[in-house]
Amino acid sequence: MDKLKEYLLGHKAGLDVDSPADGAWEQIESKMSLERRGSASWRIRYAVAASLIVLSGAGLWLVIRKDKAPADTAKQGSGINRAPAPRGDSGKAAVNGVASAPPGQNRDGGPKPAGHKTRHEKPMEPSDAVGMIDKSYASLIDFQLKKLRATPLYAENGSYFSFYVEQFKQMDQDEQAVRNDIKRYGLTNEFLEQLINVYQQKLNVLKNLETEINKMNNKVREKQSPRVQPELHYLDI
Amino acid sequence: MQHPPHIHESTVIKAGQGERSAQADLYRYYGKAMYNICIRMTGSAADAQDVFQDAFIDAFHHLGQLKQPGAFAGWLRRIMINKCIQFSRSHVRWSSLDEEGSEPAADHETAWWLNIPLDLVQEEIKNLPGGCREVFVLYALEDFPHKEIAGNLGISESTSKSQYQRARKLLRDRITKQMHLNG
């Protein structure tokens, strides 16, 4: 063994001259308490989020199925009414064995109440469901992306964060794959869930990236003298 | 690392069950030594504080899984070192220059370190550049073989050896200079 190593190993306790900051234990303690509370609340949040995803997926799937069902029934001919289904609501009414009423009138021939809206006035197409999800998530992701592109990087150039950028690109590919599947096989509950998951993962990656950038920026700010103008970079994502 | 005589294994067990006062006792007994590992590895008090706190939190979260309470000290030390290694992996950039070999210290080298105050040695270890500092601490103070250091830091074994020699030389030059300056 080299002599310096031997000496240092023998005098290691003497090297331990630094002490943790006052209040370090209190910080550890409070972080542990927060995490304990946090993990419980995260479990609840995950459970709620998972239930919402499943419910919204199931709801959309039911709406889509209901829209498809009458048309299918009409095509197959249920024996109740074989006449070609008229357009709009009346077609569904015919399928259900209810005589169709002229537009603007109810079954009894009377005018429809002003506030009345028929349930399937505009059937939701699978593309509508995907469009709805796109709208809400895409605007969130766009917002986050714009924010990140405008955030100056004091500490590192963009390449330091390439891990996140690559992850994000990978998710773009995942999203495209799910979309292709939807096109090929139609919208199913499973695909819908996958699409929502990809969007959520994208948001998570962007959030983590933001946290990492802020962490690095804060470190540079702490270490650098306020007189020194830091070199600024921007993220290309 | 030995348990302080009055730290009973039951303290470790209680701490593993989440008892705060037992955890505080363990912190009091091991905190300083663990913090010194962190500050030598990271070179900065702020980073050391972050890593140190994270490691303690991790340790207490997983303490229930420790089968032999008597092995607590070594187990905790390993968690600290792993956290420091994780930190180094994301903060140290190894350039191609790091591969350049240095001559290993000759066996007949004078023992220049013998009369050096240990606090000065500690200070200069902390001031070593990132990369060679981690290698030096892991090899000379934590007794890791170069092969393991290389695997942990994601570098080659020869880089680990050359970085150790570089750190040794820098340490000697800087400490000698300090000693001259301070008479």
Image: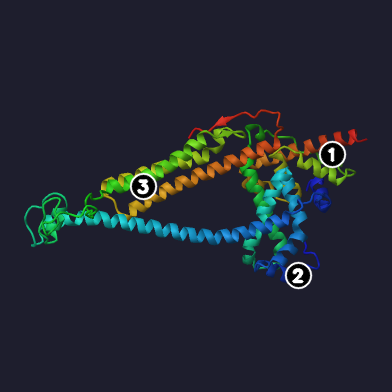
Instruction: Classify mark 2: residues with Cα within 10 Å, few (<14), some (14-19) or many (20+).
Output: few
Percent coordinates x, y for residue B154 in the rendering? 61, 43
Percent coordinates x, y for residue A166 in the rendering? 48, 39
Please say if B124 is above or below B33.
above
The chain that hosts pointer 1 is B
Residue B109 disc label: 1
Please say if A91 is above or below B90.
below
- Label 3 sits on a secondary structure element that is helix
Q: Nearer the viewer, residue B97 or B118?
A: B118
The residue where tag 2 is placed is B8
Q: Give the spatial CA distance, label 2 vs label 1.
A: 44 Å
What amino acid type is highlighted by mark number 2?
A: His
Q: Quadrant of residue A96?
A: bottom left
Q: Quadrant of residue B42?
A: top right
Do badges 1 and 3 share one subunit?
no
Q: Give the spatial CA distance, label 3 vs label 2.
A: 58 Å
Disc nearest the viewer among 1 and 3 = 3
Percent coordinates x, y for residue B111 in the rendering? 87, 42
Residue at image x 25%, y 48%? Answer: A125
The residue where tag 3 is placed is A133
